[in-house]
Image (spheres, rainbow, N blue to C red):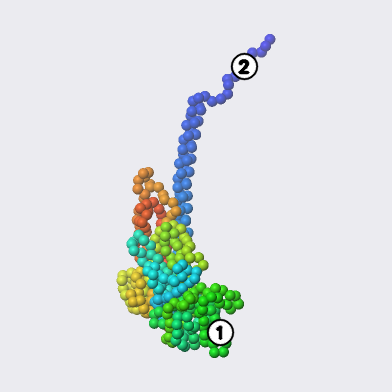
Amino acid sequence: MRPASSFRPAAGFSIVELMVAMVIALVATIVIFQTFAVSEGIKRTSTSGGDAQQNGALALYAISRELRMAGYGINNAALLGCTVRAYDTQHAPPDIKDDDGNDYTLAPAIIEPAGADTEPDEVTVNYGSSDLLSNPAKLMQNMADPTSLYRVNNRYGYTPGDVVIAAEAGNCSLAQITATPDDAGKTDEVHHNTGTYVNAEGVASAVRFNKAGGLGVTYTTDASLYNLGSLPTRNRYRVENNQLVLDSTFGPTKSAVVADNIVQFRVQYGKDDGVDNGTVNGAVYAADDGMVDNYSNTMPAAPTAQDWRRVIAIRMAVVARSALAEKPAVAGGACDTTTAAPTWSGGTLDVSADPNWNCYRYRVFETTIPLRNLIWQQL
């Protein structure tokens, strides 16, 4: 007799159970993606803010470092504010001029104020590179023509390859030493020819800074020769396309990006001229007391060497922006990430050149740099 078989229903889910599971999975997926979107937004905001912090700090450090050197080797009354004729075979064009096509002014730091509030300022920094800051050499003989050698009272610290400035009555010219002969009767000569020179290590190099036929200026025994070392510095910092750019007149790299996402740059002179313009509170407004009396971006009025000696500090602000624009709080609404323009000690920093400026976060970096080489100046 065959045993009766028991009936077992097939294992599985009903259509209702499957639909309920799908609904739960979809809800969980939506929650996960919403959480991920919020987390990604926070991450993006934090990363952008970190980038702005890093870029701004780097920009401020680079300019501050240069300004601490400003005026080294040129902090002398005969050099401050003089107009410099200069020539460099590695510069294009080789005759070096300022933006207006004139001989450039020699001062530790020269500010070029912006034409509008939305535009950034520019600053040019000048200093020498001599390891030995020797006293200026006095010319002992009038120059017959612009190519005549310099005959000086003291050649100590002057070697072939060094860049020098001859200065007299507010006029200056740049030249490169090519020889300091030790022959009898020539121990007071400093040559500045074209062609090549041999440095102290016996290496021959091409002359960079001497123009064939000279620079069109001669000097008398009232002039002096100042040693700027093997390579002077004339660097300009400016903002272009949201980047801090360094333009070097004499350096090996003529233009380089220092930092990205820099959208505003403000620079001011700190002057010890006894004038109260409302920018320094609680000061004793007395000229030449070693204290800053006011800040402004205007060049000294004359400007004479005395005026430049009274510029004893530079105050500046750098504005860095986050790399990515953030969405408005209300979908489709206006950006509200930043609702008020950033500020610094000098006032408001207008970043509205970009019509979408409200979509970004900003960091302001501000500092004041004492121009120690003017404070410790040679008189």
- Rendered image quadrant of residue 291: bottom left
Please provide percent x and percent y for residue 25.
49, 34
- Viewer-closest of 231 and 47: 231
Residue 371 visible in the current orientation:
no
Please provide percent x and percent y for residue 167.
43, 81
Asked if marks 1 and 2 touch (Cβ < 8 Å), the reply is no
The residue tagged 1 is 181
Please provide percent x and percent y for residue 253.
50, 65
Q: Circle 2: is it few (<14), some (14-19), or many (20+) Cα within 10 Å? A: few
Q: Circle 1: is it few (<14), some (14-19), or many (20+) Cα within 10 Å? A: some
- Viewer-closest of 158 and 87: 87
The mark found on residue 6 in the picture is 2
Amino acid type assigned to the residue bearing label 1 in the image: Pro
Extreme-front residue of the structure: 213
- Viewer-closest of 227 and 35: 227
What residue is shown at x 49% (from left), y 71% (from top)? 89
In space, the residues marked 1 and 2 are separated at their CA atoms by: 122 Å
Of the numbered discs 1 and 2, the one sitting upstream in the chain is: 2
What residue is shown at x 44% (from left), y 71% (from top)? 95
Residue 73 vertical placement versus 13 (above, below): below
Could you tell me which secondary element the residue under label 2 belongs to? loop
Could you tell me which secondary element the residue under label 1 belongs to? loop
Amino acid type assigned to the residue bearing label 2 in the image: Ser
What residue is shown at x 55% (from left), y 75% (from top)? 196
Give the quarter of the figure containing the C terminus.
bottom left
Extreme-top residue of the structure: 1
